[in-house]
Image: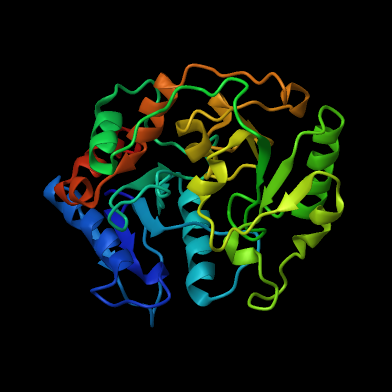
Amino acid sequence: MSQWDYDVVVYVSTLPKIKNHNIKVQIMRAFGEGAINAGARVLVDDNINNRQIYNCKLAIILGWVGMSYSGQHIYFRESIINHQKATGARVMSIDGSCFKFHPTKENEWLRYSLDSVFWNTGEYANKNSNNTHWNMIQQSLGINAQPWRENNGGHILICLQRDNGWNAKGFDQEAWLRNTISKIRNKTDMSIKIRAHPGDLNRNKTKNKHDWTFVNQVKGCELIDSVSTTLHQSMKTARCAVYYNSSSSVLSVLKGIPTFVSEESAVTWDVANHTLDAILDPEMPDRMQWLNDLSQAHWTIDQSRSGDVYKHFLPYLPT
């Protein structure tokens, strides 16, 4: 007798609220439909009043667990992750698109990975991919990879991120920013523009957020308006872009702006610089295989509903 009650359990119950018209619910139900179409034994669990864990080869959740969190649905999400790990099974996270900075229909492309949302630890089943998905994404989103900018641009752009997001991993963002500015100033007096995360910029509207105004006291540094100015606009005249590990670094790489990231879980790690010593002479590597692999990590809801996503990951599941 199999140890698995189901091949797939879609834990819609890891959402705080369940309304069938909600896009998050639709995304999760679509995966369940696709797995059924592919012949899997599937349970779609939407009972938020009696959350329980099942033995299954693959557990489906939306999102992940951050460094600090609250809410019964998040604690339940954590319990599912721990259970899957303990039983030698897999958990799949459905996460936001790395191409979300381009005009598109909501959630047209999403990321699917096993056992982690981080680029260096999650299994995206995408190594050495061909260009099929990249061609589809280019066409559907109307994007391309622009040539690298060589010694072009009037300022260095530093992009910040949410402290409590998954990517931040609880790091001290203010200390990182001060250290980053210091390292850049040791190499150049070029203008530095700081773009805070729009959600963290206004302390009057958001609790426990940083006051980044100290950057205006550093010579040649400026805190730009990230609420009314888009990320595209901020990058228009940037010579290079610097991040901790934000997924917004995907946009600078696509725009051909030499990119620096500090943390190896950054999705752009393979095509970015990792030391600010090279701020005036950055590497600009070939991006083609990275674009193919990144695109293969993304799928449409229709591809999920058809069973294509489930079948793609099936070889990675326990027998």
Task: Indicate the position of residue 205 as horizontal and vertical percent values.
Answer: 63, 77
Looking at the rendering, which quadrant does residue 262 occupy?
top right
**250 and 195: which is toward the camera:** 195
**223 and 103: which is toward the camera:** 223
Q: Which residue appears at 46% of the width and 60% of the height?
A: 80
Q: Which residue appears at 20% of the width and 53% of the height?
A: 41
Q: Which residue lies most toward the bottom here?
A: 49
Is any part of residue 172 visible from this angle?
no
Task: Indicate the position of residue 215 as horizontal and vertical percent values.
Answer: 80, 53
From this view, report whether residue 16 is shown above or below residue 133: below
Give the position of the C terminus as an image quadrant. Answer: top left
Task: Indicate the position of residue 214 as horizontal and vertical percent values.
Answer: 83, 58
From this view, report whether residue 35 is shown above or below residue 258: below
Task: Indicate the position of residue 314 as horizontal and vertical percent values.
Answer: 28, 37
Figure colour scheme? rainbow
* 296 on left or right of 170: left
Looking at the rendering, which quadrant does residue 42 occupy?
bottom left
